[in-house]
Image (spheres, helix red, strand yellow):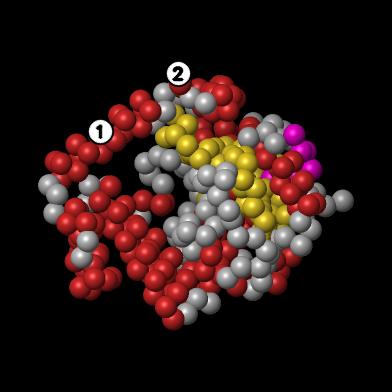
Amino acid sequence: MAPAFSVVLPTYNRAPMLRTALKTVLYQTCGDWECFVVDDGSTDDTSRVLAELKDPRIKALRNASNLGMNASRNLAIGQAQGRFITFLDSDDLWLPKRLEAFLERAKRSPEAGFLFSNAYLYRFDRLIGLLFSPERKLPEGVVPGHYAVGDRHLPYVTTNVAILRDAFSKWGVFKTQMKTLDTELFARFLAAGLPVAALSEPLSVRRLHGGQLTDRYAENFDEALQALESSGAAGETKEDMRQELAREVAVYLLKAGRPAEARAFLVKQLGGEGRKGALYKLTFAPRAVLALGRGLKRQWTKLRHHPAWAPPEFTAVRRLIAPLLAEERP
């Protein structure tokens, strides 16, 4: 009998994090799953981590060379048998009731084919907040494809998503030429009419750290524009979103301490409009000032979210994940 979920977990040279991520799959209160771990040509101890696993529901696949996350996901999707295909990035964690909550939500909304949940955000050894406010009103049902681009409408990340397996048969898999984002597939599926259902409950922990693919800002922008094309957005909506994405990239470049790149990007993408407003003026700030600002913000974030005065639910989650994270340290 086919399982309810096929978990797709691509990984590349993240052996300690992979071990942690897999433990959070094994700890699920819903055991109706299979899990495909795709080693994308790793050269670290990933093979040893996979050899330690004895659960028959976990199936290891391997690319002979590094092909990228989307090619790895496609390899697993081609073998998946679950009703839903769901995703976990190797640097993220699931909370124990993640799959159980998704299954219950699917039963309440049997028409839904694209489900996503909230998440805790983890940075600087702190739980620093949620992906989106639980009170936020989110669009559900059949929505425009461009709702999958950016987080203005649907604030999801792939670790929080589950999609009906039949949708991949109807509308295809991830585009392997896209190396940093996976938004194009989701935009394509929503544009085709796949209904959405959202869970406001945080069911995973999204780790923010250096070395993530989301740091490749210009490449992300190009791939977001491809997603916008696949979404079917046109006219004023398409242009408004393109400008919004351009400004987001400029902000990220500023935060990364690259003001000259941010300024050039604004002018290239927005022309004269890019030279207007506070964002453009900030690109003239000296690097030392930006670095000081980043340092102060980091210290403030660590102080503000110190475990000593965290909300009870954050404290409970921290206690749950702390032993797992401690095992990653040498």
Q: Confirm whether the magenta stretch covers residue 324.
A: no
Front residue of 278/168: it is 278
Say which label, 1 or 2, has the lower sequence index.
1
User: Residue sitting at 28 percent across and 47 percent down?
Assistant: 255
Relative to 301, 27 lies left or right: right
Residue 42 at x, y percent in the picture: 49, 45
Q: Secondary structure at mark 1?
A: helix
Q: Is residue 324 above or below residue 65?
A: above
User: Residue sitting at 63 percent across and 41 percent down?
Assistant: 201
Disc 1 designates what residue? Answer: 296
Identity of the amino acid at label 1?
Answer: Leu
Which image quarter: residue 194? bottom right
Relative to 233, 264 lies left or right: left
Which range is magenta? 29-36
Q: Confirm whether the magenta stretch covers residue 32.
A: yes
Front residue of 75/233: it is 233
Identity of the amino acid at label 2?
Answer: Ala
Res. 101 visible in picture: yes
Q: CA distance from mark 1 to mark 2?
A: 20 Å
Q: Is residue 169 above or below residue 153?
A: below
Q: Which mark is residue 308?
A: 2
Q: In the current view of this chain or complex, which residue is farthest to the bottom? A: 235
